[in-house]
Amino acid sequence: MAEHPPAPREAPGPAPAPDSPPASELPYRDLFLALAEELPDAVFTKDLQGRYTFINSAGARFIGRPVEEIIGRRDSELMGPEEAQSTMEFDRQTLLAGRTLRAEMSEWMAGSQREWLSTKGVLRRPDGQVVGLFGISRDMSAQRRSEAARNQSEALFRAATRSSFDAFFIVREEAEGLRLLHLNPHAEALLECEARAAEGRLLSEFPLADLVAPRALCREVWRTGRPHDEELKQEHPRHGRRWFRRQLNAVGDCMAVMMRDITEHRENELRLRLNERMAAVGVLASGVAHEINNPLAFVLSNICYIGKELRRLKLAPDELGEMMEAISDARDGAERMSGIVQSLRSLARGDAISTRPVDLHEVLDNSVQLIWGRLRSRGRLVRDYGEVPQVLGNSVQLSQVFVNLLVNATQALPETGAGEIRLMTRVHNGSWVLVEVQDTGCGIPPENLERIFEPFFTTKPVGEGSGLGLSISHDITRGLGGELSVSSTQGVGTTFRVLLPIAPEETDPAT
């Protein structure tokens, strides 16, 4: 080794104790060499000609040569031209500055690319004359690779969460509550707030905080270390009923929350189950219609026979008139039952509905007559009929629709008999007839209003309602080319609106 750095001068301080050795005898040189060998950084000194006068084992390992081959040689003899030129230029700047300099450098050494944090300073004699320089170089390659990998992982994570179809949140437990650290675009949509405005805020500041991550549930996941997975149903004031799959995973003091909107999947499942039930109802309806049709034919035949035989008997005109009127009513009822059975069989088979011009007021009056026994004890009926033309429809099916609406209106009225049902008809927009069935009953809750036409949905006790009446009425109305809608206010009443197309005027074939 050509030259070692001079021993550092002792810093001023208190005088040594009487038993301590003088400062000149302390092993500073040996201490320096021992420390230099233990350091993971390269430690070296050079003379003014750039020749290495000292280098530790870590520095020799970085250069890729034994210590004895490095001492006394210049960088141009140990490295490639580009790396040597860069190192020698830094040496020159350090000597010109006469002070310690620091720089980050990238060099190809010992067969690998290395990133250095290099510190160099001048060596002086006690009289201040510069005799060389020293250097400490820290290999930052692994740290840089780790940073690059971390940055890449973070970029991939953000790209993955941005492209995910799930809402993704990261929250951290703090004394004030759960703080939002990260959320992806679907989470933005769920919170209705952009990420840059939401990140850093407490989750409790948002209305859906308990849906996303209830604090008590998060603490339980942190305590047990087990992920939590469950399905949730939520009623949204604007978006209606929605289903979510929520997963919570604890990562240190943070919680990763995934929210998957499975509303469409659940609705498809419900629709499939509904179709299966409707198919079963169709088979049952077809069988019931077939079983009723035969005895009904006997009833009609016998009614006709009784009517003929009564005319042959010599009865008083008053008695005969009453009997014939009763038989006529029975025949009308049986024929209406026959029409309903035929409609039920057509519905079960999926046959097209036959339509013709229908007197709407006659259908309404017949429907009222069928439910009058129920209605008269619950309230009064008001007919507000306007001048309306015939509608295109099917009298049996329209009667089925209005009987269902009148029965529901009757059941909504108070039992005191103080309620009212109003039947109103008007021409609407020139090509439709509007029928309104209004009641002053209890009204329908908002959460049930949107489901009122769903098959099998009912709020009535078991055995009092099948949940099919309004659904079938809705389907019949649409099948006739019309519309059925509802509006309701709790405690005020409900209005069902039926829109039916006006029947086209018949043209004279001669014209």
Image: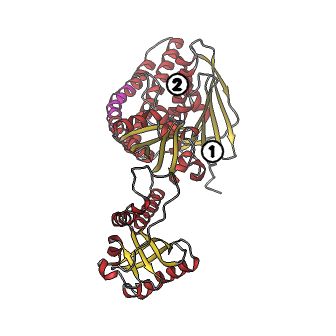
| Secondary structure category for the residue under label 1 | loop
Identify the mark nearer the N-term, 1 or 2. Answer: 2
- Residue 472 visible, this orientation: no
* Quadrant (top left/top right/bottom left/bottom right) for the N terminus: bottom left
Residue at x-position 56% and y-position 49%: 199
Residue 94 is situated, as x and y percent measured from the top left of the image, at: 53, 77
Image: magenta residue range: 286-299
In this view of the protein, can residue 493 be seen by the observer?
Answer: yes
Residue to which mark 2 is pinned: 407
Specify few, some or many for label 2: CA neighbours under 10 Å numbering under 14, 14-19, or 20 or more: some
Amino acid type of disc 1? Answer: Ile
| Closest to the observer, 463 or 290 | 463
**Is residue 291 found inside the magenta-colored segment of the image?**
yes
Element class at badge 2: helix
> Which residue: 41% across, 41% down?
347
Q: Answer yes or no: do the residues labelled 1 and 2 have beta carbons within 8 Å?
A: no
Question: In this picture, is 23 found above or below 436?
Answer: below
Q: Mark 2 is on which residue type?
A: Val
Residue that label 1 marks: 502
Above/below status of 168 relative to 62? above
Picture coordinates of residue 351 (x, y %)? 41, 46
Q: Identify which residue, 261 or 101, lies in the foreground.
A: 101
